[in-house]
Amino acid sequence: MVEHTIPTELAPVAPADPEALNRLGGALLAAATSGGLLDIGYRVIDSPLGQLLLAGTEAGLVRVAFAKEGHDLVLEQLATTISPRILRAPSRLDRAATELDEYFAGRRTDFDLALDLRLATGFRREVLDHLPTIGYGHTASYAAVAAMTSSPRAVRAVGTACARNPLPLVLPCHRVVKSDGSQGAYLGGVEAKALLLALEASH
C-alpha cells in the first residue's frame, strides 16, 4: 500500500513582477485596441477632491466620476449603457488628466477636450450644453440656466440635470447655485463644490 503524505505548509508563491505585469497589460491593451475590441478606456487620477475616474471612448471623454459614486459601480454602469469592452487604458486619458491637473493648479480656466455626451439626452443634454457659457470664477442660478433653455421655467429639471452630469468639472455644474446665492447640492459633495468655487475665485 502506497502512503501519501500531505504537506503541512504550502510553498511560498513568488510575488508578481510589476514590470512584467505592466508589459502584459500593455500588450493586452495594444491587442484590444488594434483588434477593435476596446470601446472604453479608463484611468484613475488623484486630485484635491480625491480620486477621480476618467473614462473615454474613441469619440472623447465620456465620464468623470468622484470616489463617492463608487468607481466599480460607475464602470458597471458604463458596461451596461455603452459597452462591456472596458480596459484600463491610461494613455487614452492622458490629455484629460493633464488638463485636470492644470485646472486644479490654477493654470487652466477652460477645457479643450473631445467629449462623448451620449450619456445625456433630451433636456439634460440641453442644460449641459449651456454650462460652459458660465465663465470661470462666475456662477449662475438654476433659474438663470433654465432661462437659457427651451424650457425657461424648468428650474427643478436644471437641478436634476446638474446632479446627473456625467462630466463634472469639465462641464462646470459646480458654478450653478441657488437664487439666494447659497451653493446648493453637488454630485461630488458640498465640500467639493465649495473647494472648486474657492479655487476659481482665487485666480
Image (spheres, helix red, strand yellow):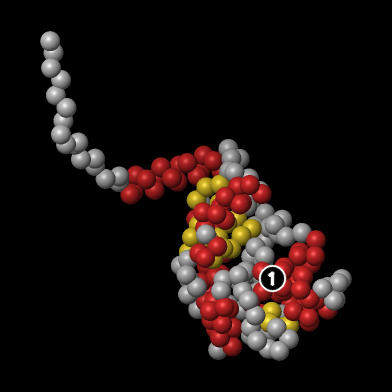
Which image quadrant for residue 137? Answer: bottom right
**Which residue is at a point 53% across and 79% down the rendered structure image?**
191
Q: Which three-letter amino acid code belongs to the residue tagged 1?
A: Cys
- The answer to whether 106 appears left or right of 174 in the picture is left
- The answer to whether 54 appears left or right of 21 in the picture is right
Name the residue beneath numbered marker 1: 162
**Which residue is at a point 80% across and 61% down the rendered structure image?**
122
Residue 174 rendering spot, x and y as whole percentages = 63, 77
Which image quadrant for residue 145? Answer: bottom right
Task: For mark 1, give the secondary structure.
Answer: helix
Residue 51 rendering spot, x and y as whole percentages = 48, 66
Residue 148 rendering spot, x and y as whole percentages = 82, 76
- What is the quadrant of the C terminus in the image? bottom right
Instruction: Tell me if I can see residue 97 in this picture.
Output: no
Residue 173 rendering spot, x and y as whole percentages = 67, 74
**Which residue is at a point 70% across and 57% down the rendered structure image?**
119
Check the image and report above or below for 52 versus 48. Answer: above
- The answer to whether 82 appears left or right of 96 in the picture is right
- What is the quadrant of the N terminus in the image? top left
Residue at far top of view = 1
Please tell me how crowded label 1 is: few (under 14), some (14-19), or many (20+) other residues with Cα within 10 Å: many
